[in-house]
Image (cartoon, grey):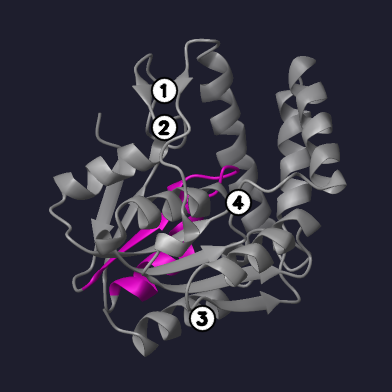
Amino acid sequence: MILSHDTTGSGPAVLLLHAGVADSRMWGPQRAPLAQQHRVIRCDLRGYGDTPLTSETFDNAGDVHALLGSLGERQVAIVGASSGGNVALQIASQWPELVSHLVLLNSAFALPATRSLQRFARREDALLEAGDIEGATELNVATWLGPDADDEARELVRTMQRHAFQVQLGAGEDIHQEAGPEIDLEAITARTLIVSGGQDLDHFRAVANHLAGRIPGAKHTQLGWAGHLPNLERPDEVTALVTEFLAEFPG
């Protein structure tokens, strides 16, 4: 199955990978500005947006690699947020020649969960076990958007997360997702910008520091104002940050 996706613009390809609380619609503010200089590809991972969950075995990195092959892309820049950042790391590690640039916004990575992340997971699990999808959705909106997010951004995240819960819970036990390729950070050759948020959970700041210390040549920027989804909290500022990084180090 090829992931649901859209493309716009022309030039060097940029792939946008969404967070686990979202789908490809989270990149709405960045899509048109990036398309002025790039071919912009957005996709929905399985169980998000317009990509369904099926009973077949899959892993997200393999799905994205197959999508890029179907589009004839031989090299791309990847911008990944949260769990989308982890998928980007898998691709850049497994197929380093495919990825020219990495921009990681509060990326996920397999470090031990901090207490704050454990508390969130317990609260979310309890709400979902009680069948309270609305409560779990509101917990995610409150947790993953920083203080600068406006009402429109909060409503978008609410809509995306509610839909993801409905699709994924509706699939029941018939989900066969594999972990995907192991990540070897030192194998990554892409020029890398790591962005962390000063208002995000401490777990993701720890991940950013870990990645910055192990990906060769990586640059790390912490945005003091940012929560977990800075591209929706201050869209213009994050768009400029990404655009300038891609222009500074062209493919």
Instruction: Give the distance between the C-alpha atoms of the residues marked 2 and 1, in whole angstroms.
Output: 5 Å
Name the residue nearer the viewer: 74 or 151. 74
Which quadrant does the N terminus fall into? top left
What residue is drawn where x is 37% and y is 18%? 54
Q: 230 left or right of 123?
A: left
Looking at the image, which is closer to me, 113 or 183? Answer: 183
In space, the residues marked 3 and 4 are separated at their CA atoms by: 20 Å
| Mark closer to the chain start, 4 or 1 | 1
Q: Nearer the viewer, mark 2 or mark 4?
A: 4
Q: Which mark is residue 125?
A: none
Residue at (45, 48) in percent of width and height? 87
Q: Please give the name of the residue rendered at 48% of the width and 79% of the height, measured from the top-left corner.
A: 217
Asked whether 56 falls inside the magenta stretch, the response is no
- Label 4 crowding class (10 Å Cα cut-off): few <14, some 14-19, many 20+? many
Residue 176 found in image quarter: top left
| Comes first in the chain, label 3 or label 4 | 4
Q: For marks 3 and 1, give the CA distance.
A: 34 Å
Q: Distance between the residues labelled 3 and 2?
A: 28 Å
Q: Do the residues labelled 3 and 4 touch (CB within 8 Å)?
A: no
Is 242 rendered above or below residue 77?
Answer: below
Residue that badge 1 annotates: 53
Residue 67 in percent (x, y) is at 24, 44
Q: Mark 2 points at which residue?
A: 46
Q: Give the extent of the magenta segment.
A: 12-35
Question: Residue 108's mark?
Answer: 4
Give SS at disc 2. loop
- Give the distance between the C-alpha atoms of the residues marked 4 and 1, in whole angstroms: 22 Å
For disc 2, the neighbor class at 10 Å (few under 14, some 14 to 19, many from 20) is many
Where disc 3 sits, the SS reads helix
